[in-house]
Structures are given as C-alpha cells and as structure tokens.
Image (spheres, helix red, strand yellow):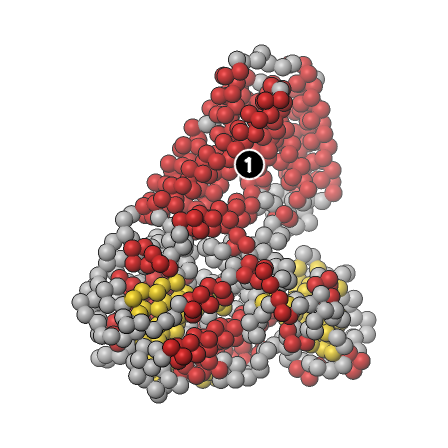
C-alpha cells in the first residue's frame, strides 16, 4: 500500500510539471491546475512514505562508532553535492573572482578546504551536541540535515525554472528532501548510496584546484621586465570603468563643458584622444591591455604571473609604487604589499561574496529579489544590497565603498623625494548606477529594467531611457571624482611635472535589442570608444587629437614620456614619438562569444555618430541633471505646479513604491530616495503611459512606463535638490499631450 501511494504521488508530480511545460519561458504556463496537482502529489507521496516507514519499521541499529562514521560520510558527500560542487563549478570558469582580490594559491587552498569540509564539519558538530541529549535526537537531527541538503540540491537543479511559482519549487524541494531522509533511514541501499558519495568532496576539490584557470593562481609571480632607465617624472593614472566617450560630448569631438567641467578642464591642458577605443569588452582583459600594451589572449587571468611585463614592473626600480587595483592584480605582491589587502580581509571578502554567489545559484528567482547582482563585478557585492538611508550604510549601499576607496587613494598622493607611480582603478560609472552628480547615493536595489537575462536591452524605450539617464548621472559623478584628483595634484604641486593619464577600460552600449556589454557588429560604435587623456610633463596647452588610437598605446606612450626603454615588444605604439600608423580596421576581443569582432574605422564612426545623435535627442546638452523631461522631452512641464498640469482624463492610477522612504529623507546621510519607482495596476503589457512625478507640489521629472511582470512599471529619477529633509509629498500621475 505504501509503495502504491508513493508511486501515485510521484506520478502526479511528473504530470504536473509535464503539463506545465518546464522548458517554456512563458510565465503563465504553470497555472492553478498544475499547482494543485503538485500539492496533491506531495500529500499522496508523503502518505506513502509514512506507510512504507511503518511497514518496514526501524532498521537494525549499527554500533554507535560505526553509525557516527556513516553519518559523517553522508554529510560529507551531500555537502559536496549541494554546497561545494555548485560553487566550484561556477568559480572554476570565473577565476577572476579570486584574481580581483589579489588572491593566490594560499587563498584558493584555504577557500577550497573551507568549502569542502566546513559545512559537513559544522553540521556533524551539531549532531554530536544533539547526541549528548539522546541518540534518537542525534539521529533526528541527522535526518533533518539530509533532508535540507537534498532540498538545496533540488533547488539548484530547478533554480532556472522561472515560470514555476516559487512556492511550488520550495514544496517540491522540501518533498524531495523528505523522501531522501526517509529513504536513508528506512532502506539500506539508500543509506549505502548516501555514504558512498563521501569521496565526492575530495574529487570536486581536486577538480577545482587543477582546473586550468584556478591552477594558474598557484603560479609563482614572475619578476617582469624593469626599465633600464627612466627620468624623474611622476606618473598618475586613473582608469574609470564602463565609460562611453559619447557621454562627455555636446557634439562630435567637443566636450560638454557645462555638464563635465573637470573633463573639459583636463582637455585644455592635455592631449585628448577623442577617437580612442578599447580592445576588449571585459574589464579583466581590457585593463591588462592598458597596463601591458598587449592584445588580450583567450583565457588569460588579470594576474601578475600571466602578465609579468606591465607598467608596475616596468617602473618598479625607478618609481615609488602606489597602486590601487580593483579587478586586476598585475602588481606583484612583493612590489605592492602596502596597498594590497591583507590575508584576513581577502578571506572575509571571499566569504561574504561567496555567500552571495551561492544564494544566487541555488535560490529560485522569487527569492533572489534584494540580493546583489553578481554580474556587475568580481568583488564587493557581498554588501551591495539595497541600502538603508543611514550614513554608516552608504559604502555598502553604493557598491561596497567605491567612493571610499577612491578617497583613500587621494589621501595617498603625497610628495616624496622619489618619483611616484600613482595608479587607481575606480569602478565608476560602472553599474550599479547609484550615484548622483552631487556625490549623494540613492537606493537602487540593483534594479536595471529593460535588460533581458542574457543582458540585452529590450526595445522598451521607457526602461532603456531610465538606464541611460542613470549611467549619464553617474558619469557626471565621475567628473566630480576627477575634479577632486586635479585639485589634489595641484595642491601637492605634482600636476605640472607629472604624466597624467585618465582613461577608461571600455564603454557601454544602449542599443535596443542588443547587448549592453558584449561586442557585436552593430554596437561597437558605443561599446568600443572610451575617454583617453594624456598630459605630458610641463604641458599647459591642450590638443584634441582625432586619430584612431587604442588602449594598447597607453603603456608605450607613458614609457616614452618618462624615458623608459621597454624590455618587451608590445602590440601598441607610442603616441608621442615618430609617426602613428592609423588603422583602417579595428579588432575587438569578445570575452564571451568566441570570434573577435572586426570593424572598419568608417563603420565605427557612423555607428558612434548615430548613437551620439540619439543621446543628444534624449538628453540635450548642458543640463546639470539631464533627462528630466523624459523620453518625450517634456521639459516644459518641469517645475510647474501640479495644479497647472492636470492628470490625463481617464488616465491610469499610478502607485509609488517605497513611499515610507520619502517620509524620512535625510540628505545629510549621503543617501536620498531620488529613484522613484512604482506601477500602474490594471495596465497591460505594451500599453505604455507617460508619467509625471511631482515632489512637494511641483513636477520634478517625467518618464514613461515599461513592461514588467505582465504589467506596466515606471522608474524615474528626480533631482536630490527637490527633496527636503523629513516628509515629502511624492505623487505620480499620467500626462498626455
């Protein structure tokens, strides 16, 4: 009878998932009938399990010592499958997770041991404590752990079934765990199978540390080629991240000086390479290309053992190194020990971010809300969830202290008898977009509407406009950071005689129905161009250079300017000596997607010009807070009284989300609720509406709804200057021409 009930329950579950179309991307296919069948299947199968357990009775007990060994082996094997294997599998293909922290063989070894042995040892310790009370209590705790680990394993397998309701996924996982626990308790074959999985812990660990990318982290740091000689010339290099050149422009080859005053100021005293392009679409390869002058090779890690010849090793003998890397670790630890995180901080960072990665891997989509996006970088997302509006949480709220680390770099700029190489990579304006031009942050919850799961922009104009505006606002914040650097250099007296390089690793694309950060033949005009400014020692007059240069040329140019002879032959060419052979075609390395993209200079110029034209249409020029008029450029509404802008007759009733935050605004905290989001209940897909957001009685911004979760939502930025301390009256209503 028990076997029959158990079989019938499982048959119902299988039929429910088959009828629901498990492989479909349609979120509506798993309806109430399938959900009811799942619940019924679980109940019937559970009854069958109870009957089977009653029929079989408790199996003969093993001696206590043997039973403990069996339990330990079962926990070791199940933890390997449910915890270690998902993490090892993901990170073996993404060794940048470790390289971004400067982690080497020691860090990886400790991580591997902790992941493979830590969870089972912890669980086994709890079992032993329960055993001090009663043997049956210890056995019950063990079966509970078996059920939980199997449930995690099932959730990992089903985590991509986004069309199945979260409650059903949790129910199925819990059911699977219960089945496994009862089977291990009541049947000898299941118990033997669970015990036999123990060697998987060692196998997965060995496969992880011997994988090609992870094993490269164990390689000894190479010494690299040092310059034979170099002049007494300081070098300051700032690498911004994910910064399209077009954001700076008011016209081709013209910086918008009102919107970006500090970039314009730098251009007046340096060489601005207005048509500079990157060579890779991923930071882990784009930054090494800047620092080595060499074209990326597939599979390379951004670590010193794989890039021994770089800017840091070149100037190590002649310059004091002050290096602040973010995603790369090209400066050998022996040279940059003072600016590297110590072992303890690295391991805490790995633990924090690893916990986020694991939850992203195993939790259903419905339970991932509020978790940081792990695709926006290789570290620092362990604390980047939606912020609480307090000063202490600003660093965590805004991408784990990007601004704070930059301020730390500025504080390290000191005059010394020996020329210095001051280098910083700042993750701005890279996502998450959360900074305002004023330097304040806003709550964001990693919300990027308009992006598909494979990170293409949809054709939804309202969602894409929201992202475009936020990127532009964060680029204005980058201008603020640049201004702080220039003022600091002038105060210390180092600006005039230094080589100052301001560059970005790559751009970002905003084309509808195309990738945001992956080269295609259609988006290179937006993704490839990035800012490049090089100020020569003693230079006081700026030049705009329109030749098509590459980030590969930065390292040879710096070497030329400081009089250092390169002991290796880079792929780039110096921009300040001899003639520069301008290419007719450019090659761009795609980290994902295999074959490199090759584009003619003329085609790139056409695509870039079209993108700039679209940007100027949407955001104009000069405005300190661009885009307040929304995609339709309803600038005439901004600042008008709500009484003068009546809602559209018969318009949608709009609901503002997180209204509580708007009632307790504290600008002094550094975080303000300037990102106003909400929805339009009852309005269906494709039915886009024009929305005005009024703050304290006046229209602050206009936007457009976009498709989200079978309905319409809006996400509109308002200037922080319109938010007053304390309570704010914020309304959203539909407008129309």
Vertically, is 639 above or below 78?
Answer: below
Total numbered circles: 1
In the image, residue 390 lies at what x, y percent? 63, 62
- Which quadrant of the figure contains the N terminus? top right
* Left or right of 328 in this view: 646: right
Residue 131 on image: x %, y %: 58, 22
> Is 393 rendered above or below residue 17?
below
Q: Quadrant of residue 670?
A: bottom right
Q: Nearer the viewer, residue 439 or 216?
A: 439
Q: Is residue 344 visible?
A: yes
Please indicate, yes or no, whether residue 585 appears anywhere in the rendered image. Answer: no
Q: Which residue is mark 1?
A: 153
Report the residue at 39% width, 44% height from top. 108
- Crowd class of label 1 (few under 14; some 14 to 19; many from 20; radius 10 Å): many
Q: Position of residue 583 (x, y in %)?
A: 30, 74
The quadrant in which residue 459 appears is: bottom right
| Element carrying mark 1 | helix
Residue closest to the far left: 228
| Left or right, residue 470 beside residue 535 | right
User: Which residue appears at 39% of the width and 61% of the height?
Assistant: 325
Q: Is residue 10 above or below residue 375?
A: above
Give coordinates of residue 159: x percent, y percent.
Answer: 58, 44
């Amino acid at each position: 009878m028990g076997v029959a009930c158990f079989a019938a329950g499982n048959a119902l579950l299988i039929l429910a998932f088959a009828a629901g179309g498990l492989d479909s991307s349609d979120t509506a296919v798993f309806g109430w009938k399938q959900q009811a069948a799942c619940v019924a299947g679980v109940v019937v199968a559970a009854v069958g399990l109870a009957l089977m357990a009653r029929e079989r009775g408790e199996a003969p007990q093993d001696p206590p010592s043997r039973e403990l060994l069996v339990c330990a082996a079962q926990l070791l094997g199940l933890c390997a499958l449910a915890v270690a294997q998902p993490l090892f599998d993901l990170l073996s293909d993404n060794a940048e997770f470790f390289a971004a922290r400067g982690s080497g063989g020691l860090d990886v070894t400790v991580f591997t041991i902790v992941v493979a042995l830590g969870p089972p040892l912890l669980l086994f310790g709890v079992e032993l404590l329960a055993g001090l009370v009663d043997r049956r209590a210890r056995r019950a705790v063990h079966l509970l752990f078996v059920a939980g680990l199997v449930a995690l394993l099932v959730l990992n397998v089903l985590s991509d079934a986004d069309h199945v309701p979260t409650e059903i996924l949790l129910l199925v996982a819990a059911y699977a765990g219960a089945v496994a626990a009862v089977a291990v308790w009541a049947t000898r074959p299941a118990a033997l199978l669970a015990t036999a999985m123990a060697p998987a812990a060692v196998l997965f660990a060995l496969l992880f540390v011997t994988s090609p990318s992870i094993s490269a982290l164990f390689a000894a740091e190479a010494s690299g080629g040092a310059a034979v000689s170099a002049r007494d010339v300081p070098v300051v290099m700032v690498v911004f991240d994910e910064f399209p050149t077009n954001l700076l422009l008011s016209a081709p080859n013209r910086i918008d000086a009102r919107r970006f005053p500090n970039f314009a100021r730098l251009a007046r005293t340096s060489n601005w390479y207005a048509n500079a392009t990157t060579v890779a679409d991923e930071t882990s390869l784009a930054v090494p290309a800047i620092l080595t002058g060499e074209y990326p090779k597939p599979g390379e890690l951004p670590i010193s053992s794989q890039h021994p010849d770089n800017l840091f090793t070149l100037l190590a003998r002649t310059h004091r190194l002050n290096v602040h890397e973010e995603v790369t670790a090209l400066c050998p630890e022996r040279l940059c020990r003072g600016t590297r995180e110590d072992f303890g901080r690295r391991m805490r960072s790995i633990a924090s971010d690893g916990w986020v990665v694991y939850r992203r891997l195993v939790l259903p989509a419905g339970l991932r809300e509020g978790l940081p996006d792990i695709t926006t970088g290789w570290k620092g997302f362990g604390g980047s969830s939606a912020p609480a509006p307090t000063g202490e949480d600003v660093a965590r709220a805004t991408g784990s202290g990007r601004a704070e680390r930059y301020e730390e770099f500025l504080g390290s700029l000191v005059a010394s008898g020996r020329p210095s190489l001051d280098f910083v990579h700042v993750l701005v304006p890279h996502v998450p977009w959360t900074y305002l031009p004023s330097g304040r942050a806003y709550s964001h919850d990693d919300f990027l509407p308009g992006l598909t799961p494979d990170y293409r922009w949809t054709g939804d104009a309202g969602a894409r406009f929201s992202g475009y505006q936020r990127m532009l606002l964060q680029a204005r914040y980058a201008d603020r950071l640049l201004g702080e650097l220039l003022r600091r250099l002038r105060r210390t007296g180092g600006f005039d005689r230094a080589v100052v390089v301001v560059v970005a690793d790559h751009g970002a694309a905003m084309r509808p129905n195309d990738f945001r950060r992956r080269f295609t033949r259609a988006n290179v005009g937006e993704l490839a161009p990035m800012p490049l400014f090089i100020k020569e020692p003693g230079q006081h007059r700026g030049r705009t250079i329109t030749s098509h240069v590459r980030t590969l040329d930065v390292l040879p140019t710096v070497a030329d300017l400081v009089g250092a002879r390169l002991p290796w032959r880079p792929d780039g060419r110096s921009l300040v000596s001899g003639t520069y052979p301008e290419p007719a075609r450019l090659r761009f390395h795609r980290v994902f997607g295999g074959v490199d993209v090759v584009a003619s200079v003329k085609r790139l110029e056409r695509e870039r010009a079209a993108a700039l034209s679209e940007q100027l249409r949407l955001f104009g020029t000069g405005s300190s807070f661009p885009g307040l008029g929304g995609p339709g450029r309803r600038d005439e509404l901004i600042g008008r009284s709500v009484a003068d802008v009546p809602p559209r007759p018969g318009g949608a009733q709009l609901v503002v989300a997180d209204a509580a935050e708007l009632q307790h605004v504290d600008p002094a905290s550094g975080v303000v609720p300037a990102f106003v989001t909400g929805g339009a209940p009852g309005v269906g897909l494709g039915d886009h509406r024009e929305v005005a957001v009024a703050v304290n009685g006046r229209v602050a911004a206009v936007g457009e709804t976009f498709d989200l979760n079978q309905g319409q939502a809006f996400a509109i930025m308002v200037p922080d200057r319109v938010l007053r301390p304390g309570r704010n009256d914020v309304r959203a209503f539909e407008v129309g021409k």
